[in-house]
Image: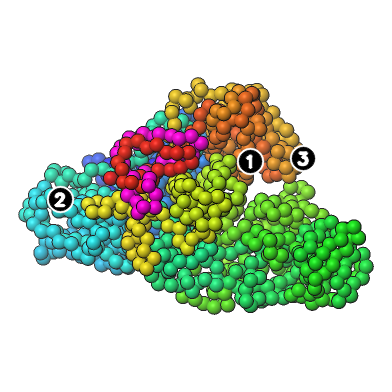
Amino acid sequence: MIDRRTSLARSPRALAGATLRLRSIGGSFRLRHGHKLPGAGALLLLAWLPGTWVQAAPEVCGAPSLQASSESAVLLWQDCATGVWTVTATAGGSQVPIAHSGAITGSQGVTTVVRRLLEANDVVDVSGSTDIDFQLNVFGSWYDAFDFSYPDGAEACVDLTSTGAQLLVGPGRTPVTTPFSLLTLGACGASDFSCGAPSYNASTDAGTFLWQDCDSGQWSLRIAGGGHQTYATNSGAVVADQSFLSVSPVSLEANDGLDTSDPSRIDYDLIVGGVYQDGLNFRLAGGSSACLDTGNGDANVFVGPGRSAVGAPFDLLTLGECGGGSNPPDDPPTDPTPTGQYPYLTDAQSGDRVTTSLPSDIDDVPFPRLSTGDTKGYGTAQQFSKYDVVHLKGFSFGYLDDVQAINPEVKGFRFFCPLEYQGWPESNACYQGSGMPFGGTGPASQGCNMYAGHWLYAPGSRLRSWVSAGATTLQVDDASGFTAGRYVVIYDGGPGAFNNAEHVRVQSVNRSNNTLTLASRGYKSTAVSHAAGSIVAEHVLGNGEAQNPLNWAYNLSTASPRDASGRTLGEVMAAWLAENYDLGERGNVTGARIDGILFDSDFHFLEQSGHNKQPDVNNDLVLDNGIAADGTNLWGEGVERFYRLLRQRLPNVIITGGVTEARGYDSLNGTQLEGFPKSGNFNSAVPDYRDLDGKLSAYLVNMHHRGMGPRYTELSSKMPTLAYPNQADVWPTSNAPFRFSFGLALMNDGYFSQENWNTDDAWYDEYAVDVVPGSSTFGQAIASNPSNESAIRRHKGWMGYPLGPSYRVYDEASFAPERNLLSGGSFDSALGDWSGRNVSVYRDTSPGDFLDGSGALHISRHNSFTASKSGAQVVGPSVRLTAGREYTLAFAAKSSEPRTLQAAVGWQTVQKMEVPDAWVRRVVTFRATGTGSYDIRFEVGRENTEVWIDSVYVFEGNANVFRRDFDNAVVVVNATPTRRTVALGETLRRIRGTGQDSINNGASLNQVTIDPYDAAILIRP
């Protein structure tokens, strides 16, 4: 893992983008990367070596020769035609993995990052937007690489932080010192200081600006919001070797902090965002030197009239390292991950696989990141103005307009269900507030008409005899598949033809006589006569209003018939949504800004959607559940195609799935894990966490294995709590279900929502806390005020940013390798007791196809396709379990394509685990219900891919206690069925609550006891 809060000595940020004056050639010049470079020989590349200037390679464009089997190095070059840069790491034949780590820091946002030949343990992290942190793990003769670019004219600096690493530049493989400037093609160095104010616009230029007035000598420090929608706390200090002559605040508010109690030190905490700026002016004593440290990990300070980008801490006059009496503030906290973590239990990830990123700051918001979730009720516009994201249907865009008028930073997402028609309650059938309109049936889906073939039907039957346009009794070959009260389609021309289609409602079904009695004819269609042999098929219903017979499902599969315009339902829907996603219910332009789309019920497998749908997606009158006989997922492939078509039309809009099972890894920005982390009835107050580990694996995949950025995955809790118990099936006794789901959300970088079906505004004390140093209300939760939520808006990002990924807290002795209950799980020798059922297995020693040791278990595709999850599986050695005791199963896996597999220990536990096409570690915990010996089992049915398994361990004990540290908070989650006490290693404080929960008592503590399935949300004092 790369520590983003690194010191000056390790970070190139201190020097990024500075101008290097090349005195040895009689002048200075700049080369701005991103421009095409001149031909060979037209440019001198100079590198600074200690004590001398040295002429290096004559060019940087063009790929060097790779000597991966004999040379351990990091190579950097630029494509001569496109200006794109490439970083490649080699191991020089080493049989021990070598980690090449470093960072690229820029003055503007990264334009593109393309990862090539990377594995799960490689990191290319662009979460900082202007910076790229990387760690490339290579061995043998293999190499890793990634491409990147910055906007034309931007500045960037490359540094290597791994010990002994060498950077070779250009086709000539010229060794250079790091940090290395892509602007000057020399060492990143500090600029000469010059006085004078810079030119900047606080509404568009975000950052810290520092300058000295040429006449008076007064220094000015300004922090500009740059139009960012989230207000952030910017902390820092100016430390001088003599007392300051004067210090004066500029545009500070009551919640800003400025401490001058030490006459030679200025500490500041300035909350800035939007189009505003805060700052201060100060004067130094004659001959005094001073040091500025931003103290909060800020990449650069822009100094002087030229806005030279300099990393803090630095000396104000030399812009170099602080020295003499200029002592910078204490180092900020570093990632507290303990060094004793076992790799097989380290399933948290810190990198991502984003290859294309949209222009949005939604992944830069401080924590906690809050969404309203699927809006079921409406509070005041003020109440909704304190959320980061609001979900609404089109008929509520006027309300969103009011919210954004109060807080323009609120992002609006259009809620849209691609599975089903939800517009039946609309007062006008052509309104589109709930989605695509349906006012009639026609040969093509356009305007308010829908082609009958674009709906989804159950396997149908045939008419036994001709019926007139007014007949209300139908005799069919088989009436067993029909239900009274549902709608059916009648059409001519054979299965899938949909000629003369009309929709009718069934009043009653007589299965003995195989007759259907109709309530009426020609619903939103024309009643016509139909010949014997015509098709009658029942509409499949969706999920949102599954009991309403008008809640018809669409046929999104690749088998969808084409209408008269030649389009499938997916093509129609993608075109309609791209044109209408930001319009109101009447197709009108509103004042609301719609930043994204949130889907609902976009399941990858139709059977996952429940409600016994019984679909026939290809309309051949045979039940298929959306899966072809050869195993092709007709439904899932159709959903994926819809995603891709929509993304092509909306390249700059956040698009998010709506269920845990949604995929779209190359098209969507993420998904909503609905009901997280509960199983069963999401709205029940009865805890049910039997699929917890599988849901955590889905969270990991969505945050770290999507190609589309920025990442947006939302964890949506729906459980009633003591604070908000309305409509609960049983009366809640605590707020633990909220803290548990909220705490788990904070173990990664997603957003959290509490669905407001049981209240207009489910707002908890943990959402906004005063952590401004020196504040008289420090540690106090900010109470909601429905008429004015400005106080909450100032404090809602109170945790700041994470100091690293989450980690598990466990007793190292209990989970030491020698305590493993399973033998033969390393696959470093023969397979032993591992065998396949309907799959072939063998020990795979190919590079990249094992994670640890020297081999892994390779599982083939199905010998004969099976749609049953357990119809293809691998069975391994048995382990001895004792009833009532807790156990942990840990393993590593990857698949040839992203998929779900099921991990089990006998019949004790079966958990669905999400596995991408790269190595990941997975952890499953369970309590044994029986005593005996039970086989390890991996079920790989339904999805026909290759799978690799490595490093399988079983331990007695439950390792599901998690911790993550933030700038201003520590979150500890107990995801086990027993109470746990966790040593904190520091003194922290509980929140002082508003009376909502007695646990928020403001107490200081250095250890915390947490009930089962609960969490502690703590403050760094």
Is the residue 986 above or below the residue 464 in the image? above
Work out whether residue 609 or residue 932 is closer to the camera in this orientation and state it. Answer: 932
Is disc 1 in contact with disc 2, using a CB cutoff of under 8 Å? no
Q: Which residues are magenta?
A: 970-999
Residue beneath label 1, please?
901
Work out which residue is located at the far front of the displayed protein and give it: 731
Q: Confirm whether the magenta stretch covers residue 533.
A: no
Colouring of the image: rainbow
Q: Is residue 252 left or right of residue 872?
A: left
Q: Which of labels 1 and 3 is toward the front? A: 1
Amino acid at pointer 3 = Ser
SS at mark 2 in the image: strand
**Label 1, residues with CA under 10 Å away: few <14, some 14-19, many ≥20:** many
Give the mark, 2 or 3, whose residue is nearer the N terminus: 2
Residue beneath label 3, please?
864
> Gap between marks 1 and 2, in whole Å?
58 Å
Work out which residue is located at the far left of the displayed protein and give it: 286
SS at mark 3 in the image: loop
Work out whether residue 161 or residue 878 is closer to the camera in this orientation and state it. Answer: 878
Query: What x and y, as percent, mark residue 806?
Result: 43, 41
> Gap between marks 1 and 3, in whole Å?
17 Å
Is disc 1 in contact with disc 3, using a CB cutoff of under 8 Å? no
- Place residue 365 in its image quadrant: bottom left
Amino acid at pointer 2 = Arg
Give the mark, 1 or 3, whose residue is nearer the N terminus: 3
Work out whether residue 944 or residue 1010 is closer to the camera in this orientation and state it. Answer: 1010
